[in-house]
Amino acid sequence: MMITTKDIIREGHPALRKTAEEVQLPASKEDKEILAGLLEYVKNSQDPEMAEKHGLRPGIGLAAPQINVSKRMIAVHVKDHDGILYSYALFNPKIISHSVEKSYLTAGEGCLSVDRMVPGYVPRHARIKLSGTTLEGEKITLKLKGLPAIVFQHEIDHLNGIMFYDHISQENPFTISGDAIAIE
Ligand SMILES: O=CN(O)CCNC(=O)c1cccc(Cl)c1Cl
Ligand code: NI
């Protein structure tokens, strides 16, 4: 079935704070349908006609816990600064290495599970190397930087019960270490 915004659980729902379970591979038909559904939501939410027709709040990523499925699955559909499309649906994504250097979105972050604006910079690893398994069962590794790196980290956080605002400084939400890379 098509995922819509009403299927997305909101902060306060305990599933958002759980650590999601590894998906047993090869994936079952059901798990493949769920993961494909996550990517379909993200793509549809960025299509003005589909978004309007189905009342979809836009997103550049989505994680299974957000539809109350506590399994390690994420989908990302986002273009980087150079217009390169990163469209992935992955089982068991894992960050295998990352830069010391940090980066952050100057516009801050938002979340479909958070029905409010939470201002502030979200410091994240500037570059990451991640592994995961595709819907076709292929094990891949990706080297990411810029906005794609940020989005994958936001989604993998959801698998570990972490919300973006957990990273925002309490003292001053707009403090960020001097050498962090600003992403406009
Ligand atoms: O977990 C996924 N969502 O909550 C979907 C809605 N949020 C976004 O599309 C979004 C917006 C800004 C920065 C980042 Cl990193 C992301 Cl991910
Ligand atoms: Ni989110």
Image: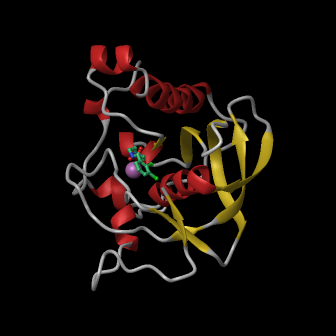
Residue 76 pos. (x, y %): 55, 40
Q: Is residue 139 left or right of residue 90?
A: right
Q: Nearer the viewer, residue 168 or 69?
A: 168
- Quadrant (top left, top right, bottom left, bottom right) of the N terminus: top left
Q: How many marks?
A: 0
Residue 116 pos. (x, y %): 20, 53
Q: Nearer the viewer, residue 178 or 135?
A: 178
Q: Is residue 154 left or right of residue 152?
A: left
Picture quadrant where residue 24 is located: top right
Q: Is residue 50 left or right of residue 22?
A: left
Question: Which residue is depicted at the point 37% across and 16% down?
Answer: 50
Q: Is residue 21 above or below residue 80?
A: below
Residue 181 pos. (x, y %): 57, 69
Q: Is residue 24 above or below residue 11?
A: above
Question: Which residue is depicted at the point 26% across and 23% down?
Answer: 55
What color scheme is it?
secondary structure
Residue 163 appears in the figure? no
Q: Nearer the viewer, residue 125 or 114?
A: 125
Q: Is residue 32 above or below residue 101?
A: above
Question: Which residue is depicted at the point 32% across and 68% down?
Answer: 120
Q: Nearer the viewer, residue 105 or 133?
A: 105
The extreme bottom residue here reads 171
Residue 110 appears in the figure? yes
Q: Is residue 2 above or below residue 118?
A: above
Question: Which residue is depicted at the point 38% across and 26% down?
Answer: 3
